[in-house]
Image: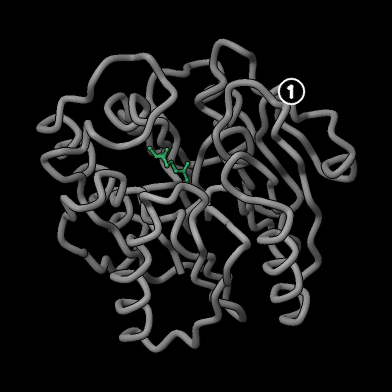
Amino acid sequence: MFRSAIVRPPSANFAEGLTRESLGPPDVALALAQHARYCDALERCGLNLIRLPADARHPDACFVEDTAVLLPRCSVITRPGADRRRGEIDAIRESLAQQGHALQAIVEPGTVDGGDICEAGEHVFIGISARTDAGGAAQLARRLQAAGHTTSEVDIRDTPGILHLKSGLSWLGDGRLLLIAALADHPAFAAWERVRIESDEAYAANAVRVNDHLLVAAGYPRTAARLRELGHALIELDMSEFRKMDGGLSCLSLRY
Ligand code: CIR
């Protein structure tokens, strides 16, 4: 069960953040409205929100998930792979320390983005990507294993279309994963029940299980229908402006 989440709204210069998408610049007013609805959804799932102020020094700062990996027995501040995002960790470290988390950290030269880390109960999948390198992944795996987790690595550097592992993979609870076709046959997932997403709905692979609900991006009707059939209680959220900046639902909160 999650009880709390850290969130941070996009800043006025959100459009200056990093992106590999070519969907045009985001509409900041619409992004703020979408963020507000996202926050409402988390509260509807029973979470207490810790709302950090927008940070114009870091136009990607609303994607708080990349700055920490929070599990009940292990809280780790990351070292984001993009230089210009490194300063985002300061406010998150301070906030988590205030909330009483005993924090570990990924240290130089390793890099880890939280978006590459997919918790699936006691097991944790660690993506190796353009942002999370082998050294950072090894540091994190050691810390997670010391806390009693099992881990496996998934190299996504040759998987087209995804920035982070969780852009293409979500844990739905129990032994079930939601994933894009390009990841579905990876040996790391062989023992898991896999719900495959069709290629034209790939963005829907980033979903977030929050207690009794599953947050999914709006606009992917076949994925939504399949997830409902499987018994998930969906909350659909419009993510259009965050998608333009390469972000998904999971990136917008740090849940614990
Ligand atoms: C970036 O490129 O770092 C941001 N524009 C998007 C980060 C998305 N984060 C995530 O998927 N966890």
Judge whether 70 appears above or below 23 on screen.
below
Farthest residue, direction front: 109
Residue 101 lies left or right of residue 178; in this view the side is left
Identify the residue shown where x is 67% and y is 26%: 180
Identify the residue shown where x is 63% and y is 52%: 118
Which x, y percent locates residue 137?
Answer: 70, 59
Q: Is mark 1 on a helix, strand or loop?
A: helix
Q: What residue is shown with label 1?
A: 182
Q: Say which of 144 and 207 sits in front.
A: 144
Judge whether 116 appears above or below 121 on screen.
above
Tell me which image quadrant ligand 1 sits in.
Answer: top left
Identify the residue shown where x is 11% and y is 40%: 12
Q: Say which of 219 and 239 sits in front.
A: 239
* Location of residue 74 by image quarter: bottom right
Which x, y percent locates residue 141?
Answer: 74, 67
Judge whether 112 appears above or below 91 on screen.
above
Label 1 amino acid? Ala
Mark 1, other Cα within 10 Å: few <14 / some 14–19 / many ≥20: some
Judge whether 235 appears above or below 98 on screen.
above
For the image shown, how many numbered marks are present on the structure?
1
Identify the residue shown where x is 23% and y is 21%: 25
Which x, y percent locates residue 105?
Answer: 54, 75
Q: Say which of 19 and 218 sits in front.
A: 19
Residue 98 lies left or right of residue 1; in this view the side is left
* Location of residue 245 by image quarter: top left
Residue 22 lies left or right of residue 62; in this view the side is right
Which x, y percent locates residue 153?
Answer: 78, 51
Q: Say which of 81 and 198 sits in front.
A: 81
Residue 195 lies left or right of residue 247; in this view the side is right
